[in-house]
Structure formats: C-alpha cells, structure tokens
Amino acid sequence: MLDYPTLKVLWWLLVGVLLIGFAIMDGHDMGVGTLLPFVGRTDTERRVVINTVGPHWDGNQVWFITAGGAIFAAWPVVYATAFSGFYWAMLAVLWALFFRPVGFDYRSKIHNVTWRRTWDWGLFIGGAVPPLIFGVAFGNLLQGVPFHFDRYLVSTYSGSFWQLLNPFALLAGVVSSAMITLHGGVYLAHRTEGAIQARAVRGALGAASIMVIAFIGAGLWLRFGGFQGYAITSVLDTAALPDPLAKTVVRSADAWWGNYGRWPVLWALPLLGIAGALLAGALAAADRTLAAFVSSSLAIAGVIGTAGASMFPFVMPSSAVPDASLTVWDSVSSHLTLGLMFWATMVFMPLIIVYTGWAYRVMHGKVTEAQIHANEHSAY
C-alpha cells in the first residue's frame, strides 16, 4: 500500500480531478440551462436546446455525487465543517437543482405556453444558481471561513449566511458563472445549427470576455487588495494521524502566492484559464466548435487548478482561529480508508469515463428543428 503522506496528496489531486470533471461534464449542462431562455426564441428552438443535454444531464450528475462522496470519505472533517458553515448555501444549490429533473421531465408534457415558459425559467435557475454559489464558496475559502474547534474537535461556524455574500466572493461567483456559461455556449454551438448556434456563439463570446476580466480582476484583488493568505510556520509530520490543532498558522499578504515562487510551473494554471477561455471563444466564432469545447474544458481546469494550487496545502482555512485551518495533512481519513478508496477509484473512474464517452458517441450529432417536429412526442 502507498504510504500515508503520498495518499494524502493523491487524494487532494483526485478531489481536484473530480471537481474539474463535475465542472466540465455537468457544467456544460448547467451552461446550456443558463442560456436556454436567451438562445431559444420559439418553443421549438427551446426544445432543440433542451434536447442537446436531455439524454445526458442525469448521467453527468454522477460527477457531482462522486465528488461529494469523495470529500465525505477522504476529508470527513472538511465535509462536516463546510456543511456547517455553508449549510444554507448548499441548501440553495439543492433547491435550485430540484428544478432540473422536474423541468426536463415535465416541461413538454403539456402544450401550454405559460407552463412551458415557467419550466424554461426553472431550468435556467437550475443551471445558473449552482455555479454562482460554488464560485462564492471558493471566494470565501480564499479569504478564510470563520470557524473554530472545541477540545473535542467539534467545529462551530461563527459567521452568517449574508457574510458569505461579500464583494470578493461575489466576484468569484461571477468568474464561475461566466466560465460555466462559456462552456455551455460552446457545447450548444457544437450541437446546434443556424440561428440557435449563432446566438450560442454570441453568448459564449460574451461569457468568455466576462470570465477573463473577472478572473484577472480577482487575482489582482487577492494580491493587492489587502487580503491575507495562510501559511504554516511549525514543523509538520505529514505521516501523523489527523489533528487540525497540531500546527501553527500565520497570515500574510503574499501567502497565497508562495507556491508560485517555489514551483514556477504553477503559473501555467492561471495562464491556461485565461488562454483557454479566449481560445474557446475564438474557435467557436470560427465554427470549430469541438476544439472550442476542448479549450473551454482546459480553461475550467486552469481556473479550478489555480484556486487549488494557490491554497495548497490548505483546504479550508479558518479566519477565526488560523491554527484550526484544515489542510491536506490533518483533515483526512485513516491510512487504510484512503488506500482502499484509492484503488477502488482506479478501477471505477475509468469505467465511468469509458461509459460516458460511449454514450456521447452514440448520441452525437446536431439536434435540429426538423428532428423535433418529427418526434413531437419525445420526452423533451
């Protein structure tokens, strides 16, 4: 079995891979939902839009469920603490997601304009709200979350829901929303044609511009806006059993930039986020939509990777008691649990990827208005 410190780092990487996979696979579904009321002008056009993601959206939810399960199993203290602090935010995500299965299944069951438009906006909520909240959550993690532990290691969140909606966190939410909208736009451009495709390209170009500006602005704000990052100053035993209080943490203005100085190769991540978004917009405008989808996927990996690399080894810093901050080294499960989960992941993740690829291969191609008229009684 792999040694404990190695498994701790591997699970940090695997959780990152799962979050990126969720953002890429379920993200383009959400991006399409966000664009739905704007790129579809008629009922038939909106059915075309819905049918581009209708056969796959529930399968893509596997990435969301797996990422949540991995955090619960690999980082149980992070899971418990995050759901205490972000409880109402996570409930808002779930409430928004409720619109998706009901909207997909019932939207076209009744030939009534009001009924269908209502569910179109429901699908919009289910697509637009979760990325915004996830971005806000990452913005708060970069600033630190107000929680502490008692002597029994029971965490207490001392902030409020409205405290999460601070200006920097909302800017991070804009980055996330624009990133997912860009991804949905290039996917929609790849699966449609004519007027819908043209509107999707315009939406993707606008989202790419907003994402790049907001991403650069957030980075500059984080560096020069008076925010303080976190750094461990005590000696760490990376092989020790988890104990979040067995370290000394200080805050400094350049802490989140320290990893880029130690490993300059990490600068490739923010550059990938910016270049990937700009290239995705340009490729979509040139009708190279599959390449645009790959580029927007790389942009997602770059943005999420930038957040993870900046914070490493921190996972959930504490602004109330910095020494209680949760890191890769002290918030994990046991050596045995991480080892068993690692090998199970090595078996099942490739199966999920292969099955997902097969499903998309079988149902590839453009969705057209002619297909909608020929299959008037289809599910979507």
Image (tube, rainbow, N blue to C red):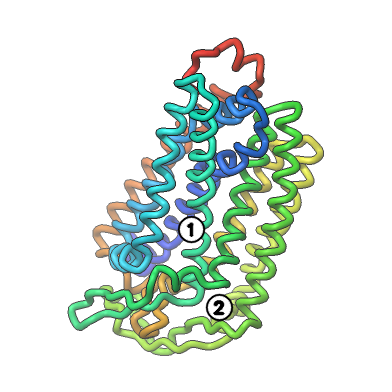
For the point 53% across and 88% down, the residue is 252
Q: Position of residue 296 (x, y in %)?
A: 65, 48
- Where is residue 376, by image quadrant? top right
Compared to residue 43, the image places residue 210 above or below, namely: below
Q: Position of residue 2 (x, y in %)?
A: 34, 61
- The residue type indicated by label 2 comes to Trp
- Marks 1 and 2 sit apart, C-alpha to C-alpha, by 22 Å
> In the rendering, at what x and y percent does residue 274 appear?
70, 59
Point out the frontmost of discs 1 and 2: 1
Query: Is residue 285 found left or right of 145 in the rendered image?
Result: right
- Sequence-wise, the earlier of marks 1 and 2 is 1
Residue topped by disc 2: 256
**Mark number for residue 133?**
1
What kind of element bears circle 2?
helix
Dot 2 alpha-carbon crowd within 10 angstroms: few under 14, some 14 to 19, many 20 or more:
many
Horizontal relation, residue 239 to residue 371: left or right: left
**Who's the residue at 29% across and 83% down the image?**
245
- Which residue sits at x=47%, y=38%? 353
In front: 101, or 241? Answer: 101
**Residue at the top extreme, as displayed:** 374
The quarter holding residue 15 reads bottom left
Q: How many marks overall? A: 2
Instruction: Tell me if residue 377 comes above or below residue 332 in the rendering.
Output: above
Against 65, is 320 above or below?
A: below
User: Looking at the rendering, in which quadrant would you find the N terminus?
Assistant: bottom left
Q: Is residue 122 visible?
A: yes
